[in-house]
Image (spheres, coloured by chain):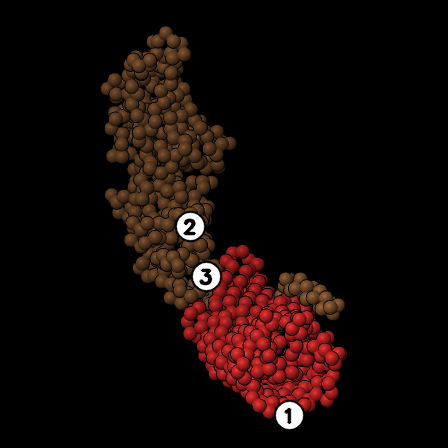
Amino acid sequence: MRAGFRLGLGALLLGAVACQEHLAAPGECPGVCPGGRSAVYDTVLTAAAGQDSTFGPVALGQPGYVAPGAGSSLRVSSGLDGRQERAIVRFIGLPDSVLVNDTLRPYTIDSVALSVTVLGRDPAASGLSLELYRLPAPGSVDSTTSFAAVEGALTPGNLLATLPIADTASTAGLRVVFTGATLAAIQIPPADSGVLALAYRLAPGPVTGVRLGSASSASPPSFITYITTPVVDTALQHQVLPRIVAFSSFVSPTPQLADAATLTSGGAPSARALVRFTLPPFIRDSSTIIRATLELTPLQPVNGLPGDTVAIDLRALLSDLGAKSPRLASSTSQILLHYLTVGESDTLRIDVTSLVTLWQPPNKLPAALFLALQPEGSSFTQAVFGSTRMGAAPRLRLTYVLPYPFETP
Amino acid sequence: MRRLLWLVPLVGLPTAVTAQSSEFGTRGLGLPGRALSVRALGTSGSFALFDSTSSANPASIGAVPALTATFTLLQNFRSSQAPGQSVTGRDTRFPQIGVFGPVGRRPFTVGLTYSTYTDRDFSVATTSDLLLRGVPVTSYDTLTSRGGLNDLRLATAYRGLAGWQFGIGFHIITGSARTDLRRSFSDSGFTPVHQRAEISYVGFGLSGGVIHAIGDHLGIALAARTDGTARVDRDSTRVNRIGLPNTWGAALRWTPSSRLSLAAEGSYRTWSEADAALVAGGGTGAQSTKGFSLGGVYVTDARRPSRRPIRFGVHYAQLPFPLVAGDRPSELGLALGSGIHFTDSRSHRDVASLDLSLEHVWRREAAGYREQAWLLALGVSVRP
């Protein structure tokens, strides 16, 4: 049995080494590369002729995707890009009594604080000040309020304060407090039903603009009233009445329209551009797209506020329904942002691989991209690119790999 | 506007890395399996046509005296060379499993075997420099294949008078290769590529053989097999039909003494049947092959021949699928083996056996491809 024992031992050893595997041998092509090499191809697709469009305010009276004031900021400018803009804000009404210990009680105003936040400014512009005006007939301040009506109300008599903007601040909170003798300036007449409306204008100075926080931003304008109520409990005597923004917008004497012959994104009301491509079936169905670059040629240098953060927002479409196409935004990877620099005029080359691959199975989304501008309806920038009708048409540069020719014996 | 970007590799990097049972198995249908038991492997295959637990000759199972199950494990240690590079590797295979047994007291035996027909296990990694969008980019490619073709044989043999054995076998040739390409680029702006395909095969074959003992000292064996064509599907889509070889084999056994048996075997396989389909599928083609082996068994204990016999042999075989079209790869092997039988003390019947073989194989092809491998095999036979 000794031989059997030895053989058994050998078998055990063999079994032990058999559990390990190290697949190694030289790989040298083309000798040991069955099927050959996987070729990489490059192609450039021009946008489908006549299928690229700008939607939004392409004619007077047409709405945009985001109306002025509905975005995250309010534009105030004095000659920037040849435009004049004033921001207007209406707060909800101030009550004439407050509920304290289950009883409505009158109150006296101790002080009032108004504040607004500067979200964007030209860092090169110095000596800026923001003028704060009170608007008459505040209850009628709404989306129909015209620039002329606002401008007519910006009189010295309605000027509440002039708030300097520190040259060193890129963003700044501006606040003014009315108390004592200055309270009279902010007193709301009974005819206004407690409603306060304000207008903001840049004080005469350099040609520039600022973006102020709007009602939908994280830093909206505020109107806070500090009051005293006639109650014995000293802890309840002093109260605060904050009023939120009921309406905010900005007005301009000249509407910001988009040229339908171009591909325009941005502005207020905002425009968006839809670019469609015809993807060859063999690329769409069979290839692996390893890089896709969208090339957009500006028709004019990017305008706007120098130093401001503005980005082209590119998304795929869930369904191609033209102007009302639902954009895909189920994950951040499906929203591409390409930041713009004011003044740049070079062709934009944007990596859109993650969107273009959605055009392929299994998603098979429409071969189109929607271009918007962020922050939408809020920035001074209106990006204008060539289309298939004007200037250089958008191009999509694709680098792809066809199915590997696995040797099929 | 469509342009092929990598037409001009900037630098021919001497790359490569991993790979498989053999670098000579990356082409065509892979490295042909030998469908031999460990006992036959110990003689380099020279006794294969006589060996009842190998799949080379259906007539050989006629010698199985009782129900027998066999299992083979093969460990491969190898060193492979390609032009400008070399690597080592190892892997494990289970190339031969079988169950055989006589049909009652009749002179018939049936057997079912499962053996490796071809082995398409490999993984090849390469790097190359490409010019993508006018910029040099290094591409890292790994091509992996797992699987191969297997041969499932149902055979029956008739043990006739005067030392004749006849056998026929029906073969189902089936299997798949799961192929996988992964490619990444030094420039992360290019998305990595991952492509997969499952290539499956199915075919049928028939085999027949005869063994005749001439006196006490001589034996001859003849075998023939035809495998028709195999259907090739890629991801369930028919992509090819490939011819499989016809095989002819002949062997002579000579037993000059009670302690020594010698055998010589030769075979011819018409792998060129596969050539047209392989070339059409982008391969390097196939060539018919010849193989020869010579070996012997020396019995160390004449009273108990199954106790520690010494098996030895040498074989030479051409390989059907060249790495470079037109080349003729081949292999030469030297083998040594032994084994032990376990006998039931009451019935004096063999109940199990354990066989070992060690073979050193040299493979080569003119284009600079070389490979040396140690093949360590363990075979277990059980007679319940």
Residue A202 visible in image: no
Q: Secondary structure at mark 2?
A: helix
The image quadrant of residue A129 is top left
Q: Amino acid at mark 2?
A: Gln
Chain identifier for the red-coloured part of the image = B
Tag on residue A289? 3
Chain identifier for the brown-coloured part of the image = A
Q: Secondary structure at mark 1?
A: strand
The image quadrant of residue A210 is top left
Where residue B216 sits in the image (x, y, percent)? 67, 90
Do circles 1 and 3 both sit on a common chain? Answer: no
Tag on residue A405? none
Chain for mark 3? A
User: Badge 2 local density, few (<14 within 10 Å), some, or many (20+)?
Assistant: some
Which residue is located at x 36 percent, y 15 percent? A227
Which mark's residue is nearer the viewer, 1 or 3? 1
- Marks 1/2 in contact by CB < 8 Å: the verdict is no
Where residue B255 sits in the image (x, y, percent)? 70, 88
Q: CA distance from mark 3 to mark 2?
A: 16 Å
Residue tagged 1: B214
Pick the residue in front: A134 or A31: A31
Q: Is residue B124 above or below residue A326?
A: below
The image quadrant of residue A16 is bottom right
Q: Amino acid at mark 1?
A: Ile
Residue tagged 2: A334
User: Badge 1 local density, few (<14 within 10 Å), some, or many (20+)?
Assistant: some
Which residue is located at x 42 percent, y 58 percent? A357
Q: Is residue B231 above or below residue A22?
A: below
Which residue is located at x 64 percent, y 71 percent? B352
Which mark's residue is nearer the viewer, 1 or 2? 1
Q: In the shown orientation, is residue B134 left or right of residue A91?
A: right
